[in-house]
Image (tube, rainbow, N blue to C red):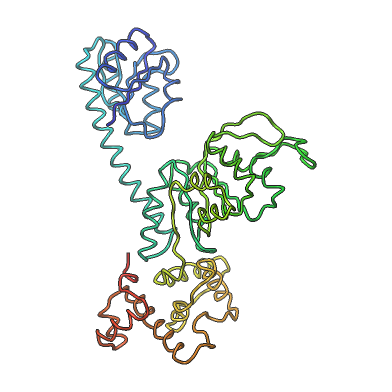
């Protein structure tokens, strides 16, 4: 329930009286003697109302109204006026003020106006939230491409977790898009305007890891010629993405755990504590608890990082997404390289759908770019070293996947195209581990 009121008046007696009335009625009250102070404290999407005197030193109530209108035209401002200011207040309402109260006013009159204004503000904020959710869904659909159930679930989870102040662990194979998901968790949350800092834990030599993570002062060690801000400090207010977290040295795991617990750090060569506010998104291929049981990772840190977990399905588990992803990668490469790329043929699509993609989305993007370049990239597909029966089975599975993908899971259309009886089709689907739901459009 919205109940916040910012009260701006240069007379302390009025501020005190209004605070008493409103507090006894359950309002959350902030008092300001100058309009400038109110504007400095005014948050974006303020869940409340501003109650302001008109005549004040510095910015007047009318000037405050104009600035609030510039920032948020739907934020209610109620003006407090003397008798001689009534015509001015009426004009202010034409300019966007919600209401005006002529001094002296009764507590009942004030409370009635505030409650009506708060009801209006609640409806505005609810409507904004709905529009923002719809916009975010559309943006996320265009970023995390896929029609599979796994991708639909992942997008819902990302939108839910993006707004929560919790650390997230992303599980997924190499090339499955873990950094892209981490970036979405940052971009669709309240930290979006702050830094997103990525660090691959496997790419940093152990002797340099602490300096990279915590930074250092000049002279902290041989070669430290100047002060350097570490990744943790640089990500203050934003998100730190730690890829391949299982590769972090045990000594640094202890220090990272302390930062997460205390929300502060010390640069190498310094005794000064620096407070940091950041969110950790970590990514790993193995299970961190398995790593902990094997003595390669701290169990307490694993629990700190894994407040929420996202699992990225490998590409072989969402084959119905392959045509859409390949087309997106090919068009992007063609635009970047100034080339044209013809639509996929049925044979090409069958090859793509039949491959297991050990390199996942990254491998698919590479194949798309090579084909746009016209390189002699052998299309992945059936292994010629297999027996004839195995090759026939693989080709049959490719044909089924391709037809189901083209027709978005429409079984009747697939039966007509492949000229199969329904019972034969069902038997083949079961044998190849396929289901109609895997290919339904979102």
Q: Residue furthest top?
A: 13
Residue 120, x across and y down, in percent? 25, 32
Instruction: Give the x, y percent position of residue 145.
Output: 42, 62
Determine the residue positioned at 49% across, 52% down. 182
Q: Quadrant of the C terminus?
A: bottom left
Position of the N terminus by quadrant: top left
Q: Nearer the viewer, residue 191 or 310?
A: 310
Q: Is residue 102 above or below residue 440?
A: above
Residue 254 falls left or right of residue 58: right
The vertical placement of 442 against 387, above or below, is: above
Give the side of residue 99 with respect to residue 138, left or right. Answer: left
Q: Position of residue 68 (x, y in %)?
A: 38, 28
Image coordinates for residue 363, horizontal then vertical, percent: 54, 70
Q: Nearer the viewer, residue 175 or 71?
A: 175
Query: Among all residues in the image, which is located at the extreme right?
Result: 222
Q: How many marks?
A: 0
Q: Quadrant of residue 429?
A: bottom left
The residue located at (44%, 63%) in the rendering is 313
> Which residue is drawn at the image coordinates 37% and 8% (left, top)?
12
Residue located at (30% from left, 16% from top): 80
Vertical order, 261 against 178 (above or below) = above
């Amino acid at each position: 329930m919205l109940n916040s009121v910012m009260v701006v008046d240069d007379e302390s007696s009025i501020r005190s009286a209004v605070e008493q009335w409103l507090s006894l009625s359950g309002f959350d009250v902030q008092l300001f003697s100058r309009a400038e102070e109110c504007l400095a404290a005014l948050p974006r999407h303020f869940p409340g109302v501003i109650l302001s005197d008109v005549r004040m030193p510095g910015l007047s109530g009318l000037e405050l109204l104009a600035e609030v209108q510039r920032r948020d035209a739907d934020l209610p401002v109620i003006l407090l006026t003397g008798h001689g200011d009534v015509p001015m207040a009426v004009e202010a309402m034409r300019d966007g003020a919600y209401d005006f109260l002529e001094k002296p006013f009764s507590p009942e009159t004030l409370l009635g106006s505030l409650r009506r204004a708060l009801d209006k503000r609640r409806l505005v904020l609810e409507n904004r939230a709905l529009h923002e959710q719809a916009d975010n869904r559309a943006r996320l659909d265009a970023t995390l491409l896929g029609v599979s159930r796994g991708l639909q679930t992942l997008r819902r989870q990302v939108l839910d977790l993006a707004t929560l102040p919790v650390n997230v662990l992303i599980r997924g194979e190499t090339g499955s898009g873990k950094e892209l998901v981490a970036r979405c968790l940052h971009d669709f949350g309240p930290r979006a305007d702050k830094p997103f800092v990525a660090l691959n834990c496997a790419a940093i030599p152990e002797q340099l890891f602490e300096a990279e993570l915590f930074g250092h002062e000049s002279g902290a060690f041989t070669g430290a010629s100047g002060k350097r801000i570490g990744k943790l400090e640089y990500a203050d207010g934003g998100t730190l993405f730690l890829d391949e977290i299982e590769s972090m040295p045990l000594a640094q795991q202890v220090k990272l755990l302390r930062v997460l617990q205390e929300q502060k750090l010390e640069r190498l060569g310094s005794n000064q504590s620096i407070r940091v506010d950041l969110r950790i998104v970590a990514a790993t291929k193995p299970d961190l608890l398995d790593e902990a049981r094997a003595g390669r990772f701290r169990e307490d840190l694993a629990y700190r990082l894994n407040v929420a977990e996202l699992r990225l399905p490998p590409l072989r588990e969402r084959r119905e997404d392959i045509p859409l992803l390949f087309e997106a990668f090919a068009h992007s490469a063609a635009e970047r390289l100034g080339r044209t790329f013809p639509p996929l043929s049925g044979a090409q699509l069958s090859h793509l759908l039949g491959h297991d993609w050990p390199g996942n989305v990254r491998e698919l993007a590479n194949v798309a770019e090579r084909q746009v370049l016209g390189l002699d990239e052998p299309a992945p597909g059936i292994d010629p070293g297999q027996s004839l029966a195995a090759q026939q089975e693989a080709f049959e599975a490719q044909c089924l996947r391709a037809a189901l993908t083209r027709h978005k899971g429409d079984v009747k259309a697939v039966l007509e195209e492949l000229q199969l009886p329904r019972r034969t089709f069902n038997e083949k689907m079961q044998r190849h581990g396929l289901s109609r739901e895997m290919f339904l459009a979102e």
